[in-house]
Every structure is written in structure tokens, then in C-alpha cells.
Image (tube, rainbow, N blue to C red):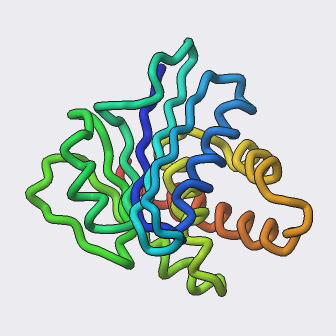
Amino acid sequence: MEKKVLIGGSGGQGILFMGKVMAYAAMIEGKEVTWYPSYGAEMRCGTANCSVVISEEAIGPPVITWIDILIAFTEASSRKFAPRLQKDGILFYDSSLMTIDNSIEVDMCGIEANYIASGLGDTRIANMVMLGAVAAITGLFTQDVLFAALENNQPRSKEQAMSVNKDALLRGFKIGEVQKSNHS
């Protein structure tokens, strides 16, 4: 099993951090993994994306052409990367920030990540809400593995951020479980 994930959005949305947590989760599970970040020169609001490849076997080049899972936080990212989705791929998008053109012929799943994060008190955790939902819907990771991966990436000096991020992951995971059961 090999899964190729691409996460796209703008700087400041936690795109690279989300990918890094995914990569650590895969490592915790003993899988082979690559994490390849790409971002514009701007610190905030510029383009940002990263790819994460998760496999049971050795992985070749980290640059991917075709993707299995696209997670888009901006319309520009969905338009740019959706054509690279495999036929059985899935597009996850933040439905509280955008709508997706129905002419795109792929499976789509809208998650109100920004709205949910706002309800939790901080829109900066929308990435963790989305990660939890994606993990639950795809079965990529369990909550425990995501929590462990988060702990490996969050500095101890930011203990409050750890708690908020865990709450966001848990909320996203629960929403993903509900969406998955509704589509079964």
C-alpha cells in the first residue's frame, strides 16, 4: 500500500506542519515516508504545499506526479492540484472557506475546518481539524498515532498549543467518523 498525499493552501494555514505531523504518524507506525515541502517567498499568505508519501516499501523520488489524496485549503490549490488526482482519489477541502466546482470529476469531501476551529477559539487549528477528519475518513491513522505524532512535533514550551491542537484533532476525527458512517 502506498498513499500519495498533497496538501495545498496559503502560508500561515499550517500546511507544512500538517504534512509533518502526517509524516511522523507514518514513521510511528513503522512505515516508509517522505515529506516534501514547497512554499513561496512570502512568510504569510503566499503559496504553500507539501507532499507526503506513505508506503510499506521503499519510496523512490519524493516528487510526485499523481496523488491519491488532495487536501485543499484554498480554491487556487484545488484548481491547481485536482487534475493530478488518481481516478479513485479523493479531494478534501475546507468547505467553510470555499466551494468546489462540481465539474471536477473526483470524489470530494467538504470539511468545515475553519468554522470548527473558530468555534474552538482559534482558526489557526483548522489544519488539525482537517487532519483528524481526513484520518478518520481514509483510515490512514488512529487518534492515538496522531496524538503521538503531534507530541513529537510540538515544542514543550508550547504546552497550551498542544492541548488546543489535540482538541482540534479529536473534533476533526469525530466529524470524519460521522461523515464516513453517513456515506456507508
Of residues 174 and 5, which is closer to you in this image? 5
For residue 10, side relative to residue 147 (left or right): left
Image location of residue 178, percent across then percent down: 49, 60
Q: Residue furthest right?
A: 156
Image location of residue 24, percent across then percent down: 69, 39
Vertical side of 134 occupied by 53: above or below? above
Hey, which quadrant is residue 34 in on the image?
top right
Q: Residue at x 56, y 37 (%)?
A: 35
Of residues 120 and 177, which is closer to you in this image? 120
Q: Residue furthest top?
A: 57
Camera sees residue 180: no
Q: Residue at x 19, y 44 (%)?
A: 83
Vertical side of 155 occupied by 59: above or below? above
Vertical side of 20 occupied by 164: above or below? below
Q: Residue at x 66, y 87 (%)?
A: 121
Hey, which quadrant is residue 165 in on the image?
bottom right
Image location of residue 70, percent across then percent down: 36, 48
Camera sees residue 144: yes
